[in-house]
Every structure is written in C-alpha cells, then in structure tokens.
Amino acid sequence: TSQKEILHDQQLSYLTKENQMIKKYLIITHVAIITTISTVLFVIISDLLGFIIIDMLIQCICVAFMNKSYDKYYNKLCIGSIFMFDLCEECSHCCDRDISLDEDMIEKGYQDLEIKDTSELQSLNTSDDLSRISE
C-alpha cells in the first residue's frame, strides 16, 4: 500500500469503531470547552452569574453523551457538529491532495503552464511518459 492510502485509512471519517469513538469524544469535548469559554466570557461581560447553571447542564449532557447508551440522542442533537467535523476533515484531505499534486506538477516542470482542462494535463502526462520510454 502507498503512503497516501495509509494516511487516508487513518482519517477519522474512515469507519472503524475506534475512529468513530475518537470522533465522538472530540466533538463532545469541543462542545463542552466552547460552551464553557462562552459562558465565562458572557458572565464576565454581563455580570449575570446565573448563566453558569446553563453551562453546568450542558456539561452534564456532554458527559452523558460519552456513554454508548445515549448514541441515538447524540446523533440527533450533535448532527451539526458531526457534519462540520466531517467537512473540515474532508477539506483538509483535499488540501493535502492539492499540495501533493502541485509538488508533482513542479517536479515534472509544469509549474509555468496554465492548465484549464484536465484533458490538457492528461496529454502532457502521456507525452512525458512517452518521452521517458523512448529514452
């Protein structure tokens, strides 16, 4: 297997029980941290200490969601966070792929070309491969 395949298998969106559990805990932990920071800032600005109770309630829900028996509630209530997590992960994977493609283009000497159509790229790759075969 290539290094790119190994890295793709390590992504958290790759469906294994361990990856799903790590992803779930990351999302729940981030929600808990973000709500705590937001609550503290709000209490400092507004001087209304009663909002700490709301943060405590959210913390209790986050701890409960870490239990497997609450998975169906977690999937319903945290659908937005799950979507954003998957979107960010896919975006970072695409960016990594684009960087490696750019490096391949520079390595082959295509960095000055403006390729607007993938058929142009394929013909360039084919001609490059043919020139290597003839050498």
Image (cartoon, rainbow, N blue to C red):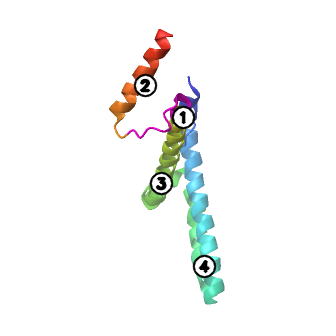
Q: Along the polypeptide, which appears first: circle 3 or circle 2?
A: 3
Q: Is residue 27 magenta?
A: no
Reading the image, the residue beneath label 4 is 53
User: Measured from the top left, where is residue 117 in percent x and y?
Assistant: 34, 37
User: Measured from the top left, where is residue 55 in percent x and y?
Assistant: 60, 74
Q: Along the polypeptide, which appears first: circle 3 or circle 4?
A: 4
Q: Which marked residue is nearer to the observer: mark 3 or mark 2?
A: 2
Q: Which marked residue is nearer to the observer: mark 1 or mark 3?
A: 1
Reading the image, the residue beneath label 2 is 125
Q: Is residue 132 above or below residue 81?
A: above
Q: Count neighbours of disc 1 (C-alpha within 10 A) and say few if under 14, some if 14 to 19, many if 20 or more.
A: few
Reading the image, the residue beneath label 1 is 106
Q: CA distance from mark 4 to mark 1?
A: 57 Å
Dot 2 and dot 1 residues touching (CB under 8 Å): no
Residue type at mark 2: give it.
Answer: Asn
Dot 3 and dot 2 residues touching (CB under 8 Å): no
What is the secondary structure assignment of the residue under circle 1? helix
Q: CA distance from mark 3 to mark 4?
A: 26 Å
Q: CA distance from mark 1 to mark 3?
A: 36 Å
Residues 23 and 105: in front is 105
The span picked out in magenta is 105-115
| Residue in view at x 50 percent, y 53 percent | 85
Q: CA distance from mark 2 to mark 1?
A: 13 Å
Q: Which mark is residue 56?
A: none
Residues 55 and 102: in front is 102
What is the secondary structure assignment of the residue under circle 3? helix
Q: Residue furthest front?
A: 112
* 29 to the left or right of 90: right
* 18 to the left or right of 86: right
- Total marks in image: 4
- Magenta-colored segment: predominant secondary structure: loop
